[in-house]
Amino acid sequence: MIISVVGGGLAGSEAAWQASRSGMKVRLYEMRPAKSSAAHKTGCLGELVCSNSLRSDDPVTPSGVLKRELEMAGSLIMESARINSVPAGSALAVDRNLFSEYISDMIADNPYIEIIRKEVSSIPAGCCVVATGPLTSEAMASAIGSLVDSRYLYFHDAIAPIVSADSIDFSKAFYASRYGKGSADYINCPMEEDEYNIFYDELIKADRVNLKEFDNIRVFQGCMPVEVMAERGRDSLRFGPMKPVGLTDPLTGKMPYAVVQLRAENRYRSAYNMVGFQCRIKWPEQRRVFRLIPGLEHGEFLRYGSIHRNTFINSPLFISNDLSFSARSDVYIAGQLSGVEGYLESTAIGLVAGINASGNLLGLKYVPVPETTAHGALVRYITESGSRNFQPGNINIGLFPPLDGKIKDKKLKRKKIAERALQDWREYLDKLKDR
């Protein structure tokens, strides 16, 4: 018995890994490097193409809970993230190259997994996990469309620029984390009011990439291009990615009017990601406008921001609670294609899909994921949300069911939700062992 997994991103790699842990043979199909995409740069499995951050590592935050659940389940992606982490304050960020290389090596050395480097244009026969991601090829999209009546929804994610560390002017920029949490891992470029206004005006009028075929782009809120966010009002950035709260400029001893934060891209701190500056501005314009930021006047951009497609299906209409297609129960969906957004969210759906697919093929009893867990909250979101206005979502506190008793203290409430999630997740994993 063999399970096919189509797609070697985070979700596909995790699904293959989990299926192999049950003793199943897995064929993992990945079209790279023979055929690549506009966003990918390597042929490595689990390559990160947007930010290198896996968000907050605080154990009582939703993303922190999700990380703990993944680790408890033996997640390969989280194992690589911990081993290849880089300083990022209270967040978990990784050296993207070492991260994907580790995943590639571990899967290549797994005797239960065979990596097949070729493009798959149709859904393989037998039990299969489809994890082709936001850059699904046209051929595979057509194949998936046959299972969902071609009811696709499209939006576009934007990736942020990366700047060389040695081009940053530290007579203006400074190291700090908000409220002094964790170590001072972020580089902060502070702005006075007049500097912010000049930057804002130039950002608004900057020449953008003309996306002719996508006149009505639906953009995921968590990855909103900075210029689109700016259109909401002059102060929108100061209350968004450029908020100065929790920071003090050592030159003035005061909180800046606005601030641009830069996060380390690798463990050597030779390159920094402009946090929240995803964009679709033309490259020469990015260089011109972003060099108006204090400290980046001579910034060397190692990567410019760009916009890329994200393909997902209206999962509540077509996906069962075990993540299988209603039209074909031996085919499972995983990753961003399912309607989750984010690296770990994609990994989580891949993990559940791998467990359920292998369990199905082995004839084991199906164990539903408790909705009180981070994994279960995500599964419920993509399978039971209203289908009329379904949009991709991150893990967030609103996805968890309320506690039995009312708790007014927000911190205590989140702590209790986190404790319940991990307890219920332990019980879920125990049930998987006993089935």
Image: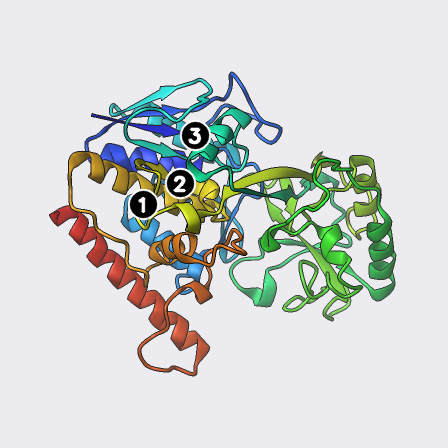
Q: Residues within 10 Å of mark 1 (few under 14, many from 20)?
A: many
Report whether 343 appears left or right of 51. left
Q: Could you tell which of marks 2 and 1 lies nearer the N-terminus?
A: 2
Residue pictured at 65% horizontal, 43% vertical:
158
Question: Residue 74 lies in what quarter of the image?
Answer: top left
- Give the labeled residue for mark 3: 7
Residue pictured at 37% horizontal, 82% vertical:
406
- Give the labeled residue for mark 1: 352
Report whether 428 appears left or right of 391. left
Nearest to the observer: residue 90 or residue 22 = 22
Whether the residues at callouts 3 and 2 have beta carbons within 8 Å, the answer is yes
- Give the labeled residue for mark 2: 334
Residue 46 appears in the figure:
no
Q: CA distance from mark 2 to mark 1?
A: 8 Å
Q: CA distance from mark 1 to mark 3?
A: 16 Å
Give the mark count: 3
- Counting from the top left corner in percent of width and height, residue 421 is at 31, 63
